[in-house]
Amino acid sequence: MNSDRTIFAQVMDYLPWPAFRRCVKRYKGERKVLSFTCYDQFLCMAFAQLTYRESLRDIEACLRFAGPKLYHMGFRGRVSRNTLANANEKRDWRIYADFAMVLIGQARKLYAKDPFGVNLKRTAYALDATTIDLCLSVFPWAKFKSTKGGVKANVLLDLRGNIPAFMHICPANVHEVKVLDLMVFEAGAFYIVDRGYLDFKRLYRLHQSQAFFITRSKKNFAFERRESRPVNKKTGVQFDQTVVLSGFYSDLDYPDPLRRIGFIDAKTGKRLRFLTNNFDLSPLTIARLYKQRWQVELFFKWLKQHLRIKAFYGTSENAVKTQIWSAIAIYVLVAIVKKKLGLKKSLYAILQILSVSLFEKEPILSALSHEGFPDEGDGLEKQLSLFT
């Protein structure tokens, strides 16, 4: 049925374009625009992400080479690097942020029943941040240190499908714990964070939202033990305690009891001390849940290696945020395509096939189902569990 349409056009069919138009209208993205619309801009950014283009000139050269195929790929405006650069500079990045969140909502529904390594019926999130380095002389607005620039991407990753449920981009010198002030917590869900988010006042707000957190305690953690429960040390669990904070300010910030769990990792021999406000799950389940926090680290590594968020097509803050949010939108789009087509290939393999076949006119299911294409890329892919 789709044999006369390019694979690129077929991939774009999975996008909810009515929702995109609403995002454009919300921020007046096409005010005084005559030809190169936000639709054309997004198609250019999607093409750049899927084919690993490194610059505006690179994008222009490849799309101009396509010639008459551009119309069949969905482009209606004339593509030029100056036009695209101007669009990235001036059109509100929130258009693409809101659209990415629409796609995230669709993807989370598709992956809602996927297992993630722990037998848990509730939703579990891993929260962390990564810094995207920028040259301070080229991006003077992104001041991080005296000689270094950057932006920080704060991501709340839904562990069922590794879909980013929440994302906030801010200057790199903003501490990641402040992102907790922007979040609306989901009652009954688990939020897994590292020690960088150990702020008892903010965690108590999470606790009052009837959500649960799992983190690690610091060495100077001041507490009083109220109760100890029996544990099986053969499982690696060393103790399971109920404690209250004994520090003057911490006790004011978090007046309720906490659960403190000691665990020794059998593989590394590392001793870990967990803090949580959940008293129902077994201590071993708490330890296994915290181990899943590593998925957000793998998500950052995967994103930086396989999407264009290190070399930017513009130098303004608006252009950088537009590119990052477009990258997230394409990441989620490919995850949606994978799920809806029932593909067994890894996300890495799908992206590699798409990168060399976007101009082809072949049914997308046939193109992505070819046997013989390796699911593994370089050696690093063997340790990633995203969408496998």
Image: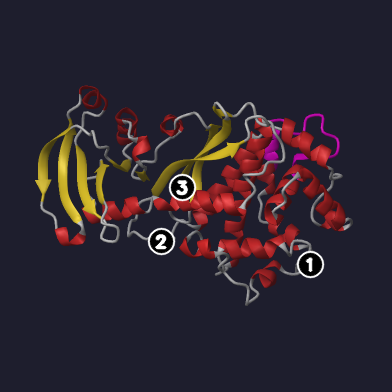
Q: Amino acid at mark 2?
A: Pro
The furthest residue to the front: 147
Residue underneath mark 2? 115
Task: Judge left or right: residue 44 versus residue 290.
Answer: right
- Residue 121 picture location, percent across and down: 34, 55
State how far apart marks 3 and 2 are (Cα). Answer: 14 Å
**Callout 3 touching callout 2 (CB < 8 Å):** no
Magenta stretch bounds: 21-39
State how far apart marks 3 and 1 are (Cα). Answer: 35 Å
Structural crowding at the residue carrying mark 1, measured as other residues with C-alpha within 10 Å and reported as few (<14), some (14–19) or many (≥20):
some
Structural crowding at the residue carrying mark 3, measured as other residues with C-alpha within 10 Å and reported as few (<14), some (14–19) or many (≥20):
many
User: Could you say which disc has been placed on residue 101 in the image?
Assistant: none
Residue underneath mark 3? 157
Q: Residue at x 48, y 56 (%)?
A: 161
Structural crowding at the residue carrying mark 2, measured as other residues with C-alpha within 10 Å and reported as few (<14), some (14–19) or many (≥20):
few
Q: Is residue 30 magenta?
A: yes
Q: Amino acid at mark 1?
A: Lys
Q: Earlier in the sequence, mark 1 or mark 2?
A: 2
Q: Is residue 14 magenta?
A: no
Q: Residue at x 70, y 33 (%)?
A: 315
**Callout 3 touching callout 1 (CB < 8 Å):** no
State how far apart marks 1 and 2 are (Cα). Answer: 35 Å
User: Could you say which disc has been placed on residue 361 in the image?
Assistant: 1
Q: Secondary structure at mark 3?
A: strand
Q: Residue at x 26, y 48 (%)?
A: 272
Task: Judge left or right: residue 86 versus residue 17.
Answer: right
Q: Quadrant of residue 317?
A: top right
Q: Is residue 82 above or below residue 70?
A: above
Task: Judge left or right: residue 65 versus residue 292.
Answer: right
Q: Quadrant of residue 288?
A: bottom left
- Residue 355 picture location, percent across and down: 70, 60
